[in-house]
Image (cartoon, coloured by chain):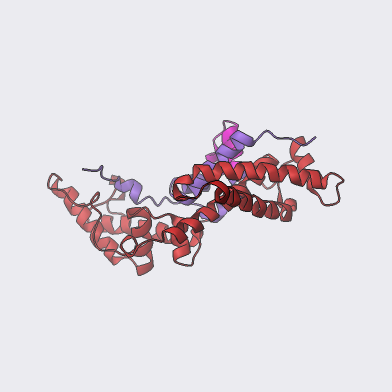
Amino acid sequence: MSTDSNAPARTALDPDSRRWVEQLHPAHPRHAEAVARLRDLLVRVSIHELSRRRARLGSIAGPEFDDLAHQAADDALLSILGKLDEFRGLSRFTTWAYKFAVFEVSGKVARHAWRRQPPSEAELNWERLPDALAPRPSDRLEQREQLQALAAAIGALTERQRKVFVAIALNEVSIDVLALELASNRNAIYKNLFDARRELRASLAEAGHPVTAQEAGTR
Amino acid sequence: MSDRPNLDELLRAQPGDAGCTAGEDIFDAYVELELAGEDPAQAFPGTAIHLRSCPGCAADHEGLLEAARRFGDVALD
């Protein structure tokens, strides 16, 4: 995994973005007004994003919901003002700024979900394929053997890879909730998941049950 | 009986995946290209691959796309 190499380094700011950057500078006479305007927008974005993720918030509503939105907006605002010089003009300023609000909401929702309902032992530990993946009497022999090979390959993963794959891919635990549970971060957990999936594909191919025709005999 | 998950999807691990951190830096530019009707995979191929496999980044991307679409055209005087 790497950075995206085709990305441009910097482009000229559009007039609206330039106005935002100039007026948010501490020395600008309209600084306070610009900050207040941006904060108001960030609150609206945070409320919208929290609403979009409401299913993971449990019973949070009313003042507690609003408080969470304001916290996310305030934290996003701090990041934006601290990173103003890093804005490269690859998007409108508002889109760049909203990214911080979305990330703050994402992190706060995950933390809330983790505190409310951390992953169970059953969601983290490997015993057998879930019902949806278990071999069925109506399956063709090849299909049944492929699923048996998958089960064996899951068992052969490293403990970390197995835990991450079982939780996220098989039991649909949120990647951010799992990262909190394992005192890690999204990127590291994703790397575990990526490696586990690659291992499983390779093991299936090696066992004569490739996932795709192109993978036959790749190992 | 529930539908069986597609094994190719369940085990998606495509070469060229840029990972989570690379996407965080350019999500805004990625979304802007989408809103302009362009294909962001041309400029950010690794992130396009990543967004098909990472549920966390996919949710953030979707949130930013909606926010930029809904609250994007705001200018200061």
Q: Colour of chain B?
A: purple
Q: Colour of chain A?
A: red
The residue lying toward the viewer, choosing from A62 and B15, is A62
The residue lying toward the viewer, choosing from B67 and A46, is A46
Region rendered in magenta: B29-44
Q: Quadrant of the C terminus of chain B?
A: top right
Above or below: residue A84 compared with residue A41: below
Prevailing SS of the magenta stretch:
helix
The residue lying toward the viewer, choosing from A62 and B5, is A62
Where in the figure is residue B14, as x and y percent of width and height?
42, 50
Q: Residue at x 68, y 39 (%)?
A: A92
Where in the figure is residue A116, as x and y percent of width and height?
44, 58
Q: Quadrant of the N terminus of chain B?
A: top left
> Is B10 on the left or on the right of A28, as rendered?
left
> Is A168 on the left or on the right of A68, as rendered?
left
Q: Is residue A164 visible?
A: yes
Is residue A146 within the magenta segment? no
Where in the figure is residue B16, as x and y percent of width and height?
48, 51
- Asked where in the image residue A151 lies, by quadrant, the reply is bottom left
Q: Is residue B43 visible?
A: no
Above or below: residue A92 compared with residue B54: above
